[in-house]
Structure formats: structure tokens, C-alpha cells
Image (cartoon, rainbow, N blue to C red):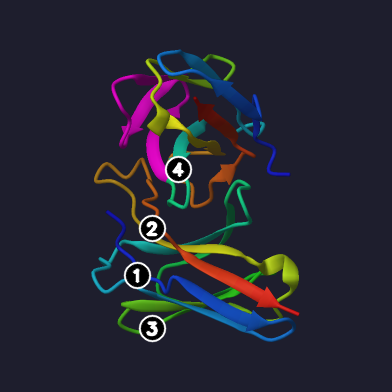
Amino acid sequence: DAKTTQPTSMDCAEGRAANLPCNHSTISGNEYVYWYRQIHSQGPQYIIHGLKNNETNEMASLIITEDRKSSTLILPHATLRDTAVYYCIVSALNNAGNNRKLIWGLGTSLAVNP
Amino acid sequence: DSGVTQTPKHLITATGQRVTLRCSPRSGDLSVYWYQQSLDQGLQFLIQYYNGEERAKGNILERFSAQQFPDLHSELNLSSLELGDSALYFCASSPRTSSYEQYFGPGTRLTVT
């Protein structure tokens, strides 16, 4: 079962920042937060991941609260091409430390409007 | 382009039939994952292989099986197909089983009539 809760849908104006929240209140200490997105019926695309520090890359920023029970993905200047379903996933290595499995929820459908 | 290829792109078949979906991972990636996505549903993890060996199993039906070959490509076999098996099937790959990122192929859309 997915360990995250996300809003079903959100809207954002083109050029504005899109802030996508995710609750993961049962996250354990060794679990990372991952974000992927899926543009209509295409294969999902990795965006970013983090453990407890905020992270930034060329696509987005990830803000994780100090208690790690929630996080926010920020697309700083959303474009029409950012319209997609965004998935927040928490996952850790297995006990043997040699495998990482992602359990997907239903995600947030983000619509970027002109 | 993620570097992961899947064939065929579309497949239409009848109930009771058997099909094989093929996946070629990114060059150098040893781990392959299979996912099923039904209409308006999230991705359901089916199975994972690493360097030819099964590494993890998810919600894979007994009618489904997979394997990874020495050249690292993988095949997902679906048999005794039912209408409910109609879905998008994605393959993903990663360099190692502990990798943070999975790289997804474009998917195979299976329609069972």
C-alpha cells in the first residue's frame, strides 16, 4: 500500500510556481522521498529525491519538513509541458541493503493553464 | 528518450490468448522492473530482475511470468488473458537494485477483447 497522501488534482498558472504537497506521516528514518511525474500515458519520469535535506536540481526543488512527515515539490516556473500526474513515493532499501522497491499511489494531476 | 525500449507499442488480442512483451533496458543497467497501469490507476509493481535473477515480486498474477536473459533484455509473458488484463505495461531499468532512479520505457498498451 502507498504510504503517501496527495491531493487528487491541482491547477497552476503558466509561469507561476507550482507547489505540490505530499503527506508521509508514517515515514521511517531510512526512507527516502521520491518524486516522479507521468505525462499522459507516457512512461514516468524521475524528478528528484531526498532524505531530510532540501534538494534542488534543474527540474525542481524538494522541501522536506523537519519532522519529515510531509514534503513539497516546487516547480519554480511551470510551463504547459509540466501538465502531468506527479507521484510522491517513499521507499527504502530492504533489510539486506541490496534492493529498493517503489510503491506508487495515485498521484496529483497538475494542470498548468495558459 | 530514457534509453529503455519496449515492443510492441500496441497489442490487441482475444481473451484466453497468450502474449509476450519485450523490454530492452538502458545500456549498462542490470535491473529491470515491470509495472502494470490500468485505466486511471497508479502503477502496480509486478516483478523485478537483476542480472538475470528474480529480485522482488509484487502483485503479479500466477498467469503472468517474466524472465531476464543473459543480454539483459526482459520479457513479460501474459497467459489466459482476461478483459481485466487490458492495461499499459511499463518496463523500467536502473543500474543497480539500490539505485534511486528508475528509467521508464514508453510502455506497451495491451487491449484484450
- The magenta stretch is B44-67
Residue B92 quadrant:
top right
Q: Is residue A69 magenta?
A: no
| Camera-side mark, 4 or 2 | 4
| Residue in the picture at 35% in, 40% down | A98
Q: CA distance from mark 4 to mark 2?
A: 13 Å
Q: Nearer the viewer, residue B80 or A75?
A: B80
Residue A65 is marked as 3
Read off the residue under disc 1.
Answer: A5
Residue under numbered circle 4: B38
Which chain does the residue under circle 1 lie in?
Answer: A
Question: How far apart are labels 2 and 1 at the CA level?
Answer: 8 Å
Same chain for the residues at labels 3 and 2, yes or no? Answer: yes
User: Which of the numbered marks, if any, corresponds to residue A105?
Assistant: 2
Displayed quadrant of residue A12: bottom right
Secondary structure, mark 1, is: loop
For marks 3 and 2, give the CA distance: 21 Å
Q: Is residue B60 magenta?
A: yes
Q: Mark 2: which secondary structure?
A: loop
Q: Is B2 rendered above or below residue A58? A: above
Residue at 50%, 32% (x, y): give it: B32
Q: Residues within 10 Å of mark 4 (few under 14, many from 20)?
A: some
**What is the total number of numbered labels drawn onto the structure image?**
4
| Mark before the other along the chain sequence, 2 or 1 | 1
- Residue A76 location, x and y as percent? 67, 81
Percent across and percent down for residue B113 are 49, 25
Side of B13 where B56 appears, left or right: left
Q: Are the residues at dot 2 and dot 1 in contact (C-beta closer than 8 Å)?
A: yes
Instruction: Kindly identify which chain the residue marked by label 2 belongs to.
Output: A
